[in-house]
Image (spheres, rainbow, N blue to C red):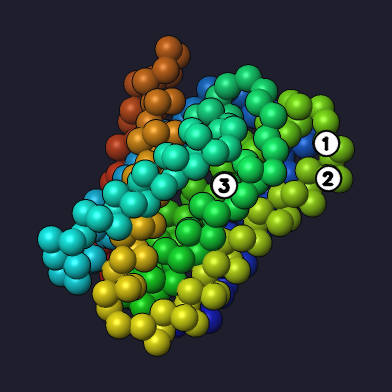
Amino acid sequence: MENQIVYLFLFFIFIITMTGGWIPTLKPWSQKAFRMLISFCAGILLGAVFFHMVPEISPILGRKMGFPIMLGFLGIYVMEKFIMVHPCEEGACDYHKIGLAAYIGIGFHSILDGVAIGAGNVLNISLVILLAVTIHKFPAALALSSILIKGGEYSRQKILVSMFIFALATPIGALISMNVMDHLSPDPIGFALGISAGTFLYISIGDLLPTVHEEDEKKNLNLLLLFAGLLVMFLSMGLEG
């Protein structure tokens, strides 16, 4: 994939993340609308893992493929549940204080998103990874900004500055990894993509999927949107190459 197109997508990721962080400062989203968006995102991330990332790294890593995926999965799990205060199902819970540890954790995952883009660029699946990251960043920013607003401890200006830093993490991670990975052999690139696949898998299963079957009169629509996200990633298999 041409670097110029990747740079354009990275700029778009920055814009859409900032938009997600800016919207709650104007008007909060309803929980029903939020759950529908999250359900679609869960399908996008699951589809990215199983239709694109795993098939791409399996020829490179072979039987060793499970280790980086498990590392990414458990890394995000430990970080969210034991190190930082997690924003419960991407914003579907009451207010929790988010301190420095939370920002470090969320920022680290954003950098891993950038690493996935860099690895995908080398392995010619960058467009697919970009799609998954872009769609995921909007609700992540929406949730983070909403929780900060619920806390009442941050001014609108401080929230927007925080979201600006958050929005920069993925593009910076992608730019660094693209330059580094261009000079690496396939094994470390596949390992990095495996770690990113593990983080995508945890975010979709641990954070997003619980919203699909919550007690809600629209949960059947949520399930339909989950499959719609999977279908988008299945159809996008033709974009590889």
Q: Nearer the viewer, residue 152 or 129?
A: 152
Element assignment for label 2: helix
**Residue picked out by circle 1:** 154
**Residue picked out by circle 2:** 158
Relative to 9, say whether 157 is above or below. above
Element assignment for label 3: helix
Whole-number angstrom distance, CA of label 3 to CA of label 1? 19 Å
Check disc 2 and give the amino acid type: Lys
Q: Residue 50's spot in the image, x, y percent?
A: 24, 51
Q: Quadrant of residue 7?
A: bottom right
Relative to 105, say whether 38 is above or below. above
Q: Quadrant of residue 9?
A: bottom right
Check disc 3 and give the amino acid type: Gly
Horizontally, residue 73 falls left or right of residue 237, namely right
Horizontally, residue 43 falls left or right of residue 22, namely left
Q: Mark 3 or mark 1: which comes first in sequence?
A: 3
**Residue picked out by circle 3:** 105
Verify CB contact (< 8 Å) between mark 1 and mark 2: yes
Residue farthest along the left direction in this orientation: 63
Residue 163 - label: none
Check disc 1 and give the amino acid type: Tyr
